[in-house]
Image: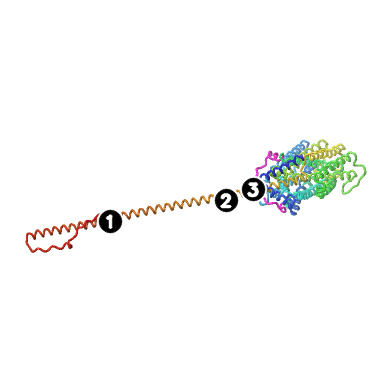
Amino acid sequence: MEEQTTSAVAVEGQDMAAVAVEGQEMTAAAASEGVSASSDNMAVGERLSTRNLIMYPLGTFGRDFLYNFFNGFLLMFVLLTKHLTDAQFSMITVIIVLARIFDAFNDPIMGSIVENTRTKWGKYKPWQLIGAILTGGVIIALFNVPLDGWAFFGFLAFAYFMFSITFTMNDISYWGMMPSLTSNPDDRNKLTSFTQLVCSAGGGLAGLLVPLFTVGDIAQGLGLGAVKGYGLMSVIVVVLMVSFQLFTILGVKEKPLPADFKKTERMKFKDLFKVLFKNDQLLWCTLVMLLWSLISGIAVGNLITFYIYFEFGYEGMLGTVFSIVYAVLSVVFTLFYPRFSKKLGRNKTLYSCGITLIVSYVILLIIGLAWRNDVGGGFDIMGMHITPKFIVMALFYGFTGWSTGFYMIMLINMANTVEYNEWKTGKRDEAIIFSLRPFTAKMGSALTQGVVSLVLMITGALVYTDRISELENYGTQTGQNMSGQLKDLIATIDESTKMKLLACMCVIPIVIMTIALIIYKAKCKLDEPTLAKMIEETEAKKALAALENGEQEQHSEGEEGAIAGIEEQSECERHSEEAEQTENTESDGETEQAETSEANGEAEQTETSEADGESKQAETSKENDEEEQTETSDDYDVAVSADVPEEAEPAPPAENRPRHTKTKRK
């Protein structure tokens, strides 16, 4: 697998080099420079602010207190406060298992909803607040309802399914936020380490306080007992959850949401499994984390508590001592994890955690089977009888707290699969990928409830828990202190029941952790050098794509400018043609007008000439008529004179005679 992963990295590098050879030399060089600058300035990934480093982890203190209270003590609450038949207990077990399975498959759906959420408060914070408030209402109602038998069974089924929905709102949005705060490996280690430290503190405090105020002399002395004690603790855990969530909601500064966000389709189960099977590292991380959740639920939670009460006494402080030792080793590992990780690497550190757990449970099994509790004497303190066997077993149980680093490292590995997913598919899918973390926790819880219930029925422990429940309820109803009666009842538990509980408590975690280590060794390959190389190549591809997009945009702008120039030139030509056409039209009009004017002038001249000619002809005719008339008159006068002889007048000279000229007509 390691060879395949390395070779895949090389193939991607060859593909990028091929792109450069095909004419992108300058682009590839710029991309390389961008990656180099990014690596120098950011140490591979965006850095984490001090504000987010503090505010984000603080938000989970109350969350883990509440979740450990619900997940670790619900079955204890049912067994110690409710009177149930074997059939009713079996049905409750079925309901719890089904609800946890529903809860596990509900996580990817909620992951898609969170991924598509866009508000002015971001996509994570609204769901964190809504989920915290609604979960608080469900918890208070469940641990304070005065029901029993089948009525309680029906209400528990409703409340459990409601918790599956409401807590998922908060859980998915909280853990989905973490990988978005930084992609720098060192900062992510610090953030995860600090967050896990706060998780351990919150869950550990639940392990300390809940037994103290619900079981034993202290609870009885305060007038609480199991019934009232669990009711009071439910209110406390709700206040803690909502209060500490405000640190994250009000204090964490998220990165701005992308302006070009496009809503993605709601994730379907088949789509989830497609993503899961495409991301092989996510697949194996999910499986290993599921196995770890099963280990922690079976050994760390329920079975160890019943074994302590049955073997060392029905006293909540005894369980608190075990929890304190466990928490101390867990906190020590969390504080020094960054040093271990830098010196040894994550893989060797993880192997140390798994091997420590296996060795510790082997020793616990040997001590528990070979050492009787009444050997070596003991002493009394704060209502507890402390024996040498109790001290030794508490110390070696504390070493299993070192194994909490196993979960923390797997959480980092799951966060790293986001970068692996981006390197392989081009998508990060942070909320969807991180929805698998609570998926493994809740699926592991479902399996845990089934296994624990089966162990309690097989070992015969339910007979004794039912008697304890009767005494607790009687003391609550009458107000009596039932410490003496409860201690007497514990003394009657037979050794075979204790040994069976011890064997199941130790052997099951040993087998499961062995399987988890084998899978991790064979399949999980996202070590620090491989991850760093993937991040660099992803950044290079991003830079290359950005430069190519810039060139395409520039080319597109050039094409748009050329097209605009052509259109402008065409427009100018069109306007020129229109102007020429207009000029031609005007010229033709003027020519026609000139021709018309000329024709009109000629016509008028012709008419004038004709008129003048006619006038002159008329005048000539008139003159001719007058001349003829004159001649006629002259002839008449001659004739008369011829008739009447008179003295003839001399004829006028020729030059005084009128001339007759002919006028030529045009």
Quarter of the figure with the C terminus: bottom left
Q: Please say whether residue 521 is visible from this viewpoint.
A: yes
Quarter of the figure with the N terminus: top right
Q: CA distance from mark 3 to mark 2?
A: 18 Å
Q: Nearer the viewer, residue 430 or 497?
A: 430
Instruction: Give the foreground label among 2 and 1.
Output: 1
Residue 587 horizontal/vertical position (percent):
41, 53
Residue 458 horizontal/vertical position (percent):
82, 35
Neighbour class for label 2 at 10 Å: few (<14), some, many (≥20)?
few
Q: Which mark is residue 146?
A: none
* Left or right position of 472 against 166: right
Which SS class for mark 2? helix
Q: Which residues are magenta?
A: 249-276
Mark 2 or mark 1: which comes first in sequence? 2
266 in the magenta segment: yes
The residue depicted at 66 percent of the width and 42 percent of the height is 266
Q: Which mark is residue 549?
A: 3
Residue 342 horizontal/vertical position (percent):
81, 48
Instruction: Give the foreground label among 1 and 3.
Output: 1
Mark 1 or mark 3: which comes first in sequence? 3
Residue hosting label 1: 609
* Residue 613 sits above or below residue 498 on the image: below
Q: Please say whether residue 236 is visible from this viewpoint.
A: no
